[in-house]
Amino acid sequence: METRQLGQSDLRITPIGIGAWAMGGGGWEWAWGPQNDSDSIAAIQAALDLGINWIDTAAVYGLGHSEEVVARALHLRRPRPYVFTKCERVWDEDGRIGGSLKAASIRRECEVSLGRLKVDAIDLYQIHWPQPDEDIEEGWTEMARLQREGKVRYIGVSNFSARQMERAQAIAPITSLQPPYSILAREVEKAELPYVRRNHIGVIGYSPMHSGLLTGSMTRARIAQFAPDDWRRHNPNFLEPLLSRNLRLVELLREIGRRCGRTAGEVAIAWTLANPAVTAAIVGVRSAEQVFGVIGAGELRLTQSEVGEIEAALRQEVPV
């Protein structure tokens, strides 16, 4: 599989990487419902066997559990893939999640993540959310300090606005931005993607299949059976009036995929990767079978005609 340089770092990453959010399992505020650890480990191994060379996780996924699963999957794996994780989301003894960009908190989180992941240095350490906004400078200064100390190799941001990135850049260079970016989530096209292109910042987009909605396997019946703690139950794109439009869009993605022997999900990911500002996309997987359904996205190139079909489908009116 081809690799691409991430920003101005020496990291060369495959166009798609493993997203480990759902691998955190159930029972916390932003869970995807129950998840079997053996399935998660099998998914990671299958992805690595097929050439993917990086994994993205976060301390908050499963309140630490996702990082532990990643460590188990990578035990004795040589060569080890790049491991990316995130800080800033913290939780109390009751599992209530908040944000902290205080220097002491970020340093503590880094040390704990290093222990859970069982690595000597984190390849890319990212601020998960820019919250609270007034502490961005303090948090980014500490991130740069961790990088100088060798605890992390590169530092990036997630969910930052262009203005917030500008504030961080005044302190230390940003290696990458991790924004939500899919056919159904395009807000970053206005300011953030132009900013990163001007400043040679890498982009690893998350949720290119919009949290599973664009995979081609999502149905009304499946949505109705989401686990009670699945956060997607409250996502407007999984509810009417948007759901009907989105399912029609999936049928188009399935038809485009049919023409070239790819899945609807692979078409959705390829759409995200087609933007020249995007370095790579994070693809969440929960089983080895799901890996096989997305791996072809890294080599799929949509034609201008196919992109036009997708744009036309998006312009269809949504009933109110």
Image (spheres, helix red, strand yellow):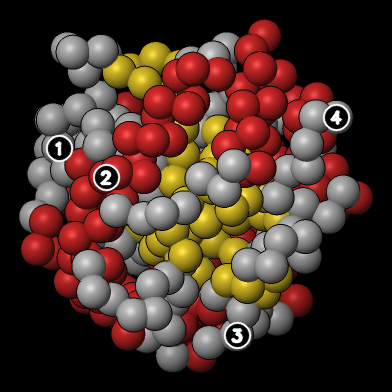
Q: Earlier in the sequence, mark 2 or mark 3?
A: 3
Front: mark 3 or 1: 3
Residue nearest the viewer, comparing 107 with 139? 107
In percent of width and height, residue 238 lies at 35, 39
Front: mark 2 or 4: 2
Q: How many marks?
A: 4
Q: Which residue is mark 2?
A: 116
Q: Which residue is mark 3?
A: 2
What residue appears at the point 20 percent right and 42 percent down from the top-left corner?
65
Q: Residues within 10 Å of mark 3 (few under 14, many from 20)?
A: few
In percent of width and height, residue 245 lies at 47, 48
Front: mark 2 or 1: 2
Callouts 2 and 1 close, C-beta under 8 Å: no
Q: Quadrant of residue 242?
A: top left
What amino acid is labelled 4 in the image? Ala
Callouts 3 and 1 close, C-beta under 8 Å: no
User: Could you give the CA–CA distance between mark 3 and mark 1, rounded to whole angstroms?
Assistant: 34 Å
Q: Secondary structure at mark 4?
A: loop
Q: Describe residue 49's horizontal placement relative to residue 27 as left or right.
A: right
Q: Secondary structure at mark 2?
A: helix
What amino acid is labelled 3 in the image? Glu
Q: Which residue is mark 4?
A: 170
User: Could you give the CA–CA distance between mark 2 and mark 4, rounded to whole angstroms?
Assistant: 32 Å
Residue nearest the viewer, comparing 56 with 205? 56
What residue appears at the point 58 percent right and 71 percent down from the top-left corner?
13
Q: Secondary structure at mark 1?
A: loop
Q: Describe residue 193's horizontal placement relative to residue 160 as left or right.
A: right
Q: Earlier in the sequence, mark 1 or mark 4?
A: 1
Residue furthest to the bottom in view is 260
